[in-house]
């Protein structure tokens, strides 16, 4: 039988202006850089590295939409071309305008040591100082540029042009081109050249033969859509047809996404697309940016009505040609011929395939690559010639029909049952029951890196030594000291340590045997449930995968994480895990099958500041005192893992000590308990695919704590703080004494004034007549005698005769016959006059 399965995940991510700081939702162009993406829009340019940075049209001096972008010659440099003809350049830190074309820029290509600029009125090349027109293409609208080796391909509104060895040549519809108005060109690294023109698509092989691809499904509503093309590393060509949505071409067949809600792409107005370094496709649309994540995660379900039990996955095995064999609990065995492809699955059952029952417990490949299946009613082996599952020839009676696990070795297959263990020899076609495990319920088996068989049972763990002897590990035995329990449920060998083994104990935890003794790793791997079903180790890096009732957990020796992808991973139990030959992971559980291809783009992390100060302000190493906190502020990002889901690790290396990597529990990072000396603070980020960033480093100098002063009844206080407090207290005491003195004197003057009958509110005009001036002749003469060499200020309380004295002084000075000076009295009344008005009057009048 052939079973159809449906993808039930939503492998799309959307980015918008409102949610993600995209400068505009109208995205016109996309450029893939080194662990970064650039988006040209009608209102500026956005940059994505896991965090968004946008440059609006005003800051760029931009007068049109950015239709084309290209990578520069130096790392992280970028060229951008606009409708206005502006050619912008990003040097890694700032944007600047490099040139102004006479028409809108439509395409850019950095190749052959030059920057080619396609425009509405022809093709140009940037010399570094100016744009030089290419004569054969003047007046033609250039829409697409591509480089194949040393050959330049140019798509125009009048056909396809090529430039090679200094010569230009052209191709038209009469020579196999799918149309005259070429809108897109994609060069397949394997050789073919893909071209879109006049709403048609075709590819040209190395011999010059064109092969058309039917685009009828995308031209029904729009007979001449503008099409863009790009290919990925998986043999598929992706396209965008404005107004008709997106499509992809696999083995010559085109499949369209209507853009009306299906598969997460919610708009048919796709204007740009690009494939990043991990094979994910990015779509620029009139309503934001969409990313197709189906290359990373997919979850699928079969028809459980027609095939009951098809979605309960008990075991998985990966074949040498990327096949995946799937043991189900009720629907037989599923075969994916080419991994996660669109090919239908082959379904083997008890009525179509030779299985003794549809309840399959285990599947494994022997040394010849042939699959074996353990079932509720015995064991069978797949015969490729008949496409049937057959009983192995010469296999004797098993201790029990219920096969619990299978494990291949170089000679044959180990068959575990609920009542014992049997070994089948492929060459001799004979089987032998293992007496040492008679009546034992075999729950798990694994071969370690030394080629020894480990067998888990309900009464402990058995190891077959290389001389054939069996060693029994149990909690009660000396060999099993440190084992968490005797009920073993899963095993997985560590490929990087000789004789090492991971062991899961029923509802208790996880042990690790390092070849000599047992270690408890339950808390270290931090699985969400102790109800563990499967352990699996990566053959390359040795990292551990744990399938449990709480999902799937990954531990790489440094950190662990339970993976969580909305709609992709099974909701709960993971019963089976396998890695195929392409490096992809498959997870099976009670509710379907999940495909996971870990991406390889590393995250990044940067230190922004120390103790609330930007890092750029420190001309030397930041310095703290030993009794102070060191607060390190950092920022991190990743293209596929949200910043909040990144794991940040740090390490502190101090005088004569190398620290251990630890997980940062918070941001910013707060560090304490330093001793005097120089320290190195290192930070590293890890994403959900367990890619690690480059290490960022910070050197810090720690000074000894300042001396302290012991005070009675108080805790010791720093000496500099004590001195500052003492000085402040002394100044406060002086101020208090001064204020007290002023208050006392003011009160004394008040009492004296009352005593002598002084009344500041006595009214009357100043005394101007000399015959009415009494009692101050001596004071007036003293003032006149002093004026020759001094400036004098007369001050006193109100209404005591100051103005009268001034009038009398003026009268005496007018009559004074002085041999040296001529005194000119000048009286200025400043009452109610502002300082500003007074000096302004002096400047104007004097």
Image (spheres, rainbow, N blue to C red):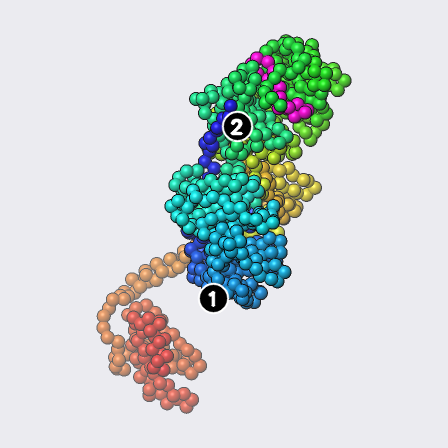
Give the residue displayed 69% in from the left and 22% down from the top.
409
Tell me the residue that label 1 is attached to.
102
Q: Nearer the viewer, residue 61 or 107?
A: 107
Vertical comparison of 423 with 835: above or below: above
Q: Nearer the viewer, residue 715 or 59?
A: 59
The spot of residue 827 in percent (x, y) is 32, 79
Q: On residue 369, which mark appears?
A: none
The spot of residue 557 in percent (x, y) is 63, 33
Give the residue displayed 62% in from the left and 56% down from the top.
150
Q: Nearer the viewer, residue 617 or 638?
A: 638
The spot of residue 425 in percent (x, y) is 70, 17
Mark pair 2, 1: CA separation: 57 Å
The spot of residue 539 in percent (x, y) is 65, 31
- Whether residue 172 appears in magenta in the rendering, the answer is no
Q: Name the quarter where the C terminus is drawn.
A: bottom left
Vertical comparison of 432 with 582: above or below: above
Vertical comparison of 295 with 395: above or below: below
Tell me the residue that label 2 is attached to.
345
Q: Main secondary structure of the magenta part?
A: strand
* Residue 699 makes an appearance in the image: yes
User: Is tag 2's residue or tag 1's residue first in the polypeptide sequence?
Assistant: 1
**Residue farthest toward the front in the current orientation of the protein:** 174
249 to the left or right of 505: left
Give the residue displayed 47% in from the left and 32% down from the top.
7
Q: Please state the extent of the stretch shown in magenta in the rendering.
A: 365-384
- Whether residue 383 appears in magenta in the rendering, the answer is yes
Element type at mark 2: strand
Question: Pointer 2 and pointer 1: residues touching (CB < 8 Å)?
Answer: no
Vertical comparison of 206 with 85: above or below: above
* Residue 706 makes an appearance in the image: no
**Residue farthest toward the right in the current orientation of the protein:** 467
752 to the left or right of 309: left
């Amino acid at each position: 039988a052939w079973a159809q399965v449906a993808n039930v995940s939503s492998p799309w991510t959307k980015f918008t202006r409102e949610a993600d700081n995209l400068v505009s939702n109208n995205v016109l162009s996309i450029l893939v850089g080194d662990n970064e993406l650039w988006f040209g829009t009608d209102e500026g340019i956005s940059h994505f590295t896991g965090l968004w940075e946008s440059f609006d049209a005003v800051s760029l001096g931009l007068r049109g939409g950015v239709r084309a972008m290209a990578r520069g010659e130096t790392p992280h440099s970028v060229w951008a071309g606009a409708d206005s003809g502006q050619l912008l350049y990003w040097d890694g830190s700032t944007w600047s305008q490099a040139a102004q074309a006479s028409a809108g820029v439509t395409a850019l290509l950095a190749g052959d040591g030059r920057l080619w600029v396609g425009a509405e009125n022809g093709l140009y090349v940037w010399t570094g100082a100016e744009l030089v027109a290419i004569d054969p293409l003047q007046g033609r609208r250039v829409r697409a540029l591509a480089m194949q080796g040393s050959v330049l391909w140019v798509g125009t509104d009048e056909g396809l042009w090529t430039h090679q060895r200094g010569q230009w040549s052209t191709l038209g519809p009469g020579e196999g081109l799918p149309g005259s108005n070429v809108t897109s060109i994609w060069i397949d690294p394997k050789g073919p050249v893909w071209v879109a023109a006049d709403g048609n698509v075709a590819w040209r092989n190395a011999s010059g033969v064109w092969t058309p691809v039917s685009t009828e499904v995308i031209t029904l509503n729009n007979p001449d859509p503008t099409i863009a093309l790009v290919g990925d590393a998986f043999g598929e060509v992706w396209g965008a047809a404005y107004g008709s949505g997106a499509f992809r071409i696999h083995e010559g067949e085109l499949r369209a996404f209507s853009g009306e809600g299906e598969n997460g792409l919610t708009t048919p107005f796709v204007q740009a697309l690009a494939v990043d370094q991990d094979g994910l496709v990015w779509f620029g649309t009139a309503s934001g940016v969409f990313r197709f994540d189906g290359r990373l995660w997919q979850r699928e379900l079969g028809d459980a009505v027609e095939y009951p039990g098809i979605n309960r996955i008990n075991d998985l095995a990966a074949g040498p040609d990327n096949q995946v064999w799937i043991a189900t609990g009720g629907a037989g065995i599923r075969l994916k011929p080419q991994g996660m492809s669109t090919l239908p699955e082959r379904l083997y059952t008890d009525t179509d395939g030779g299985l003794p029952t549809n309840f399959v417990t285990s599947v494994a490949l022997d040394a010849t690559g042939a699959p074996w299946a353990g079932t509720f009613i015995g064991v069978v082996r797949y015969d490729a010639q008949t496409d049937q599952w057959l009983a192995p020839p010469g296999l004797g009676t098993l201790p029990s029909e219920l096969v619990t696990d299978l494990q291949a070795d170089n000679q044959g297959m180990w068959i575990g049952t609920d009542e014992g263990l049997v070994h089948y020899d492929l060459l001799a076609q004979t089987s032998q029951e293992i007496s040492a495990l008679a009546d034992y319920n075999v729950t798990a088996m694994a071969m370690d890196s030394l080629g020894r068989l480990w067998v888990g049972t309900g009464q402990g763990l058995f190891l077959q030594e290389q001389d054939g002897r069996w060693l029994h590990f149990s909690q009660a035995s000396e060999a099993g000291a440190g084992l968490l329990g005797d009920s073993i449920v899963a095993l997985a060998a560590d490929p990087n340590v000789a004789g090492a083994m991971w062991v899961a104990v029923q509802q208790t935890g996880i042990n690790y045997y390092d070849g000599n003794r047992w270690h408890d790793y339950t808390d270290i791997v931090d699985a969400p449930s102790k109800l563990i079903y499967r352990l699996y180790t990566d053959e390359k890096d040795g990292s551990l995968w744990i399938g449990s009732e709480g999902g799937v957990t990954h531990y790489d020796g440094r950190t662990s994480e339970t993976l969580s992808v909305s709609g992709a991973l099974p909701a709960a139990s993971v019963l089976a895990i396998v890695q195929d030959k392409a490096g992809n992971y498959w997870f099976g559980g009670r509710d379907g099958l999940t495909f996971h291809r870990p991406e390889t783009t590393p995250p990044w992390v940067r230190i922004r500041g120390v103790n609330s100060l930007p890092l750029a302000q420190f001309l030397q190493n930041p310095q703290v005192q030993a009794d102070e906190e060191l607060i390190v502020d950092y920022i991190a990002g990743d293209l596929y893992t949200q910043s909040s889901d990144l794991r940040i690790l740090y390490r502190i290396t101090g005088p004569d000590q190398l620290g251990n990597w630890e997980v940062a529990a918070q941001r910013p990072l707060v560090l304490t308990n330093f001793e005097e000396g120089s320290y190195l603070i290192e930070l590293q980020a890890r994403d959900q695919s367990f890619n690690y960033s480059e290490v960022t480093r910070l050197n810090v100098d720690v000074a000894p704590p300042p001396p302290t002063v012991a005070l009675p009844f108080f805790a010791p206080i720093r000496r500099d703080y004590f001195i500052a407090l003492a000085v402040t207290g002394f100044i406060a005491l002086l101020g208090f004494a001064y204020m007290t003195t002023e208050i006392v004197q003011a009160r004394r003057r008040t009492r004296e004034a009352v005593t002598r009958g002084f009344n500041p509110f006595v009214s009357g005009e100043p005394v101007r007549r000399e015959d009415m001036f009494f009692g101050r002749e001596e004071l007036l003469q003293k003032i006149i005698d002093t004026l020759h060499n001094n400036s004098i200020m007369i001050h006193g309380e109100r209404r005591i005769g100051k103005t009268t004295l001034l009038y009398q002084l003026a009268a005496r000075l007018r009559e004074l016959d002085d041999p040296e000076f001529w005194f000119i009295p000048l009286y200025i009344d400043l009452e109610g006059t502002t300082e500003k008005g007074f000096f302004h009057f002096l400047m104007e009048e004097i």
